[in-house]
Amino acid sequence: MKNPVPINNPSQIAGDELFAGNADHNSNLVERESSGGKSQWTSMTQLVTRKRLFRVIVSLVIAAVISFAVPVFVSRPALTRAVSEYVKNPNAITEATLREEKNKVSSEILVTHLTVMAVLGCIILVCWSARDFEG
């Protein structure tokens, strides 16, 4: 049985050896050097999956940096009312109302950041993946 040829570039797999009929069942394996100096064989599906996972992670990190760098402004009349009531009469009831309104605003800001991050991540991922399909 013939040993598979080490392939440095996954695009080399579609070479003449695969279509000549003399390729064995290990021809879709790619040899990679591990840290110990030994070579290990990785299938193309694992490489493609790792590439996709890398793209998803990088896209989400870039989207997170962009979405959390831009401040979100939420205008809530109830928060304005709670602040003015607390300034006029600082007691436990107005403080609780103010804290509740602040929590609502904080959750709206977080949801807005996460939504923008998801949308930007999808856009970045689609644009990045579309480059693979260009002719």
Image (tube, rainbow, N blue to C red):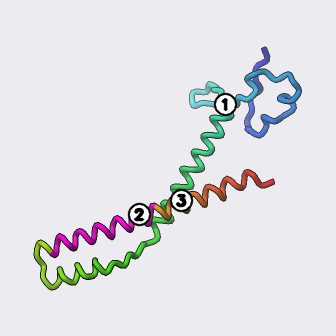
The tag on residue 113 is none
Q: Is residue 45 above or below residue 57?
A: above
Assign a secondary structure to mark 1: strand
CA–CA distance between discs 3 and 2?
18 Å
Q: Amino acid at mark 1?
A: Ser
For residue 40, side relative to residue 134 (left or right): left
Name which of mark 1 and mark 2 comes first in the sequence. 1
Name which of mark 3 and mark 2 comes first in the sequence. 3
Residue name at image x 39 percent, y 68 percent? 109
Majority secondary structure of magenta residues: helix
Considering every residue shown, the one lying at the far left of the view is: 91
Q: Amino acid at mark 3?
A: Ile
Residue name at image x 86 percent, y 30 percent? 19
For residue 11, side relative to residue 115 (left or right): right
Considering every residue shown, the one lying at the far top of the view is: 1
The tag on residue 62 is 3
Name which of mark 3 and mark 1 comes first in the sequence. 1
Give the x, y percent position of residue 63.
Answer: 52, 60
**Residue toward you, 91 or 50:** 91
Which residue matches tag 1?
A: 43
Magenta stretch encompasses residue 105: yes
Magenta stretch encompasses residue 78: no
Q: Which residues are magenta?
A: 94-114
Which residue matches tag 2?
A: 111
Q: Amino acid at mark 2?
A: Val
